[in-house]
Amino acid sequence: MTRLQVIDTERCVGCQLCMYACQRRFGKGGIGSAAIFVRSRGGMGRGFRVVVCRACSDPPCAAVCPVDALRIRKGGGVILQPNKCIGCGHCQEACTIGAIFWDDRANKPVICVHCGYCANFCPHGVIALVKEGSKDVIK
């Protein structure tokens, strides 16, 4: 099993290509429904922070879902079952790093599926897909 990992945030220049790539994966333009977010640390001089699901082994988002719409993913993280989701938002509140984003149009969470599509577009090697239990980057 693989998962997306932030390798080095110091290399991030805030280009948001990862966000555009994620959105493109769904065949949409823009960045409104991306499952990864690049945020300023408080000014250009302080750099950027990449916010994405860290594939928790015991994800608090799944624990608070009242309808079991978040299935535990082998290797960490969760898989959203949109047909079960009632849009309560408890999962977003429970995520300790703020890595669950919200699709207002669908009224459902947007959660990284660790496909690595975004990593293929990062020109600075900030994020990468890695094998579970390894530090080997998958190219």
Image (spheres, rainbow, N blue to C red):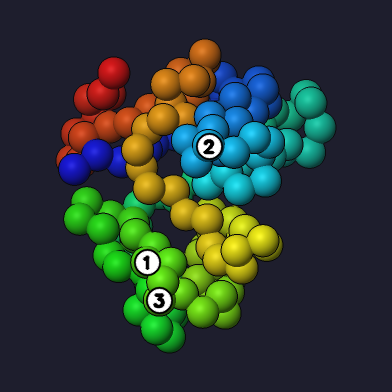
Which numbered marker is on residue 94?
none
Q: Nearer the viewer, residue 67 or 99?
A: 67
* Residue at the far right in the pictured view: 43
Q: Please state the horizontal and vertical placement of residue 95, each as a whole percent of the image.
A: 51, 64
Dot 1 falls on a residue whose secondary structure is loop
Q: Quadrant of residue 102?
A: bottom right
- Tell me if I can see residue 30 in this picture: yes
Alpha-carbon distance for marks 1 and 2?
19 Å
Quadrant the C terminus occupies: top left
Q: Residue at x 40, y 76 (%)?
A: 84
* Three-letter amino acid code of the residue under disc 2: Gly
* Three-letter amino acid code of the residue under disc 1: Gln
Q: Nearer the viewer, residue 118 or 28?
A: 28
Q: Please state the horizontal and vertical placement of residue 96, each as a whole percent of the image.
A: 52, 63
Q: Please state the horizontal and vertical placement of residue 32, each as a whole percent of the image.
A: 67, 46
Which residue lies under the disc numbered 1?
A: 81
Which numbered marker is on residue 84?
3
Which residue lies under the disc numbered 2?
A: 27
Q: Residue at x 41, y 71 (%)?
A: 83
Q: Residue at x 39, y 63 (%)?
A: 80
Quadrant the N terminus occupies: top left
Q: Residue at x 56, y 19 (%)?
A: 11
Q: Is residue 70 left or right of residue 30?
A: left
- Tell me if I can see residue 60 in this picture: no
Q: Quadrant of residue 50?
A: top right
Establish if 16 lies above or below 97.
above
Q: Please state the horizontal and vertical placement of residue 119, each as a whole percent of the image.
A: 43, 26
Please identify, in this view, whether the residue under mark 2 or under mark 3 is nearer the observer. 2
* Residue at the far bottom in the pictured view: 66
